[in-house]
Image (cartoon, coloured by chain):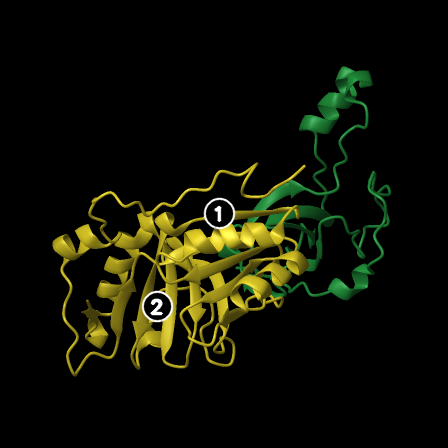
Chain colours: A yellow, B green
């Protein structure tokens, strides 16, 4: 039984050449709820990075690690709650559960990457799912960013408990998000598309006291 | 509010991230066709409701989404231990009948997982 691209799995590029305008999951929210521009008093700045390539990798850690090393020259984070970036900082892979990882790459790369990973994995037992259409990334920066998160997530974001290079799936207000800390100053929220409006408006409301601004 | 140790995430998380999923270690009859109605009904519908030590399945619903087991005291709500699926509890109520588990015992020692926290 083969699991290679050619004979078993039909992959397809979700980014077609057809001239269809694409909109960020927050497009309507920007129009309806507004997007206050950040000023010098903003202690928290929100910035959405839509249209990235999100791939969910499932399978054994060893085979996935080998494939990722050969294709992307990145290793798979084996430790729970860990998050790794490549040298450019544009590609990341995060531990989600003992047999699941989230790979985020610049938009447009994911289709070719998925095919190359499938080729490298060959007949191994695995699944690769393109979830880019279902979620978006919201960046949170500024001196009050962690304070804003304390009001929003149930997870302890104290630097001792949440060092750089950690990422967890947790409850954000009444939704769930993947919360990641790529650097000392920046937090990333991986939000489901359908919750993006809710999370965005929650952040604007909770961040009002810090003069939150939206970078667009 | 419980603060529950997830054996897969390797750390304590808020109860809000978890859901209880009922009694643990219920073995499906090996040959359902030859079960009597009573045996099958017991398997499907009847659960123990002990006062004291109870083994339960929980799922880390917002998190790693894995099922695991908790040994909990139903009278005090104290969580005595958490352990992975397929493992056996290290804390049992000796007054109860031994667990009817069809699985083979695993090589891990459940004593490693004495991480539960009292409510």
Q: x, y (%) of residue A89?
A: 42, 74
Q: Please determine whether, in this image, residue A30 is positioned above or below residue A47.
A: above
Q: Are marks 2 and 1 in contact (CB under 8 Å)?
A: no
Residue named by callout 2: A151
Q: Please determine whether, in this image, residue B26 is positioned above or below residue A47.
A: above
Q: How many marks?
A: 2
The numbered mark, 2 or 1, whose residue comes first in the sequence reads: 1
Q: Is residue A195 rendered to the left or right of residue A97?
A: left
Corner quadrant of residue A152: bottom left
Which element carries disc 2, helix, strand or loop?
loop
Disc 2: CA contacts within 10 A as few (<14), some (14-19) or many (>=20): few
Which element carries disc 1, helix, strand or loop?
strand
Quadrant (top left/top right/bottom left/bottom right) for the C terminus of chain A: bottom left
Q: Is residue A125 rendered to the left or right of residue A25?
A: right
Residue visible at 76% across and 48% down in the picture? B86
Disc 1: CA contacts within 10 A as few (<14), some (14-19) or many (>=20): few
Q: Is residue A78 rendered to the left or right of residue A10?
A: right
Q: Which of A174 and A13 lies nearest the eye of the viewer? A: A13
Q: Chain of mark 2?
A: A
Q: Which mark is residue A180?
A: none
Q: Which of A161 and B90 lies nearest the eye of the viewer? A: A161
Q: x, y (%) of residue B105?
A: 85, 49
Q: Which mark is residue A129?
A: 1
Q: x, y (%) of residue A121?
A: 61, 52
Corner quadrant of residue B96: top right
Residue visible at 17% across and 57% down in the picture? A30
Q: CA distance from mark 2 to mark 1?
A: 33 Å
Q: x, y (%) of residue A65?
A: 62, 62
Corner quadrant of residue A188: bottom left
User: In this view of the protein, can residue B87 be seen by the observer?
Assistant: yes
Residue visible at 80% across and 19% down in the picture? B35
From the image, state whether disc 2 or disc 1 is nearer to you. 1
């Amino acid at each position: 039984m083969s699991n290679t691209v050619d004979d078993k799995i039909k992959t397809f590029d979700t980014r077609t050449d057809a001239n269809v305008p694409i909109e960020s999951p927050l497009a309507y929210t920007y129009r309806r709820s507004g997007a206050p521009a950040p000023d010098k008093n903003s202690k928290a700045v929100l910035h959405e990075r839509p249209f990235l390539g999100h791939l969910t990798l499932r399978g054994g850690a060893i085979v996935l690690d080998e494939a990722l090393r050969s294709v992307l020259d990145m290793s798979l984070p084996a430790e729970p709650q860990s998050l790794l970036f490549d040298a450019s900082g544009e590609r990341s892979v995060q531990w989600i559960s003992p047999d699941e990882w989230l790979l985020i790459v610049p938009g447009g790369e994911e289709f070719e990457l998925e095919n190359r990973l499938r080729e490298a994995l060959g007949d191994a037992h695995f699944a690769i799912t393109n979830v880019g259409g279902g979620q978006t990334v919201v960046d949170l920066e500024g001196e009050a960013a962690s304070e804003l998160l304390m009001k929003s997530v149930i997870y302890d974001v104290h630097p001792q408990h949440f060092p750089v290079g950690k990422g967890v799936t947790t409850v954000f207000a009444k939704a769930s998000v993947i919360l990641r800390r790529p650097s000392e100053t920046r937090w990333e929220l991986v939000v489901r598309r359908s919750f993006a409006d809710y999370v965005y408006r929650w952040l604007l409301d909770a961040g009002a006291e810090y003069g939150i601004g939206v970078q667009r | 509010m419980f603060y529950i140790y997830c054996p897969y995430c390797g750390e304590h998380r808020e109860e809000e991230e978890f859901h209880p999923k009922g009694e643990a270690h219920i073995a499906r009859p090996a040959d359902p066709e030859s079960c009597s109605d009573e045996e099958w009904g017991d398997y499907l519908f009847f659960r123990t409701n002990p006062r004291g030590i109870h083994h339960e399945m929980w799922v880390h619903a917002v998190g790693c989404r894995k099922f695991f087991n908790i040994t909990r005291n139903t009278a005090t709500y104290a969580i005595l231990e958490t352990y992975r699926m397929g493992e056996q509890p290290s804390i049992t109520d000796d007054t109860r009948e031994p667990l009817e588990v069809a699985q083979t015992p695993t090589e891990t020692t459940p004593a490693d997982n004495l991480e539960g926290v009292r409510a």
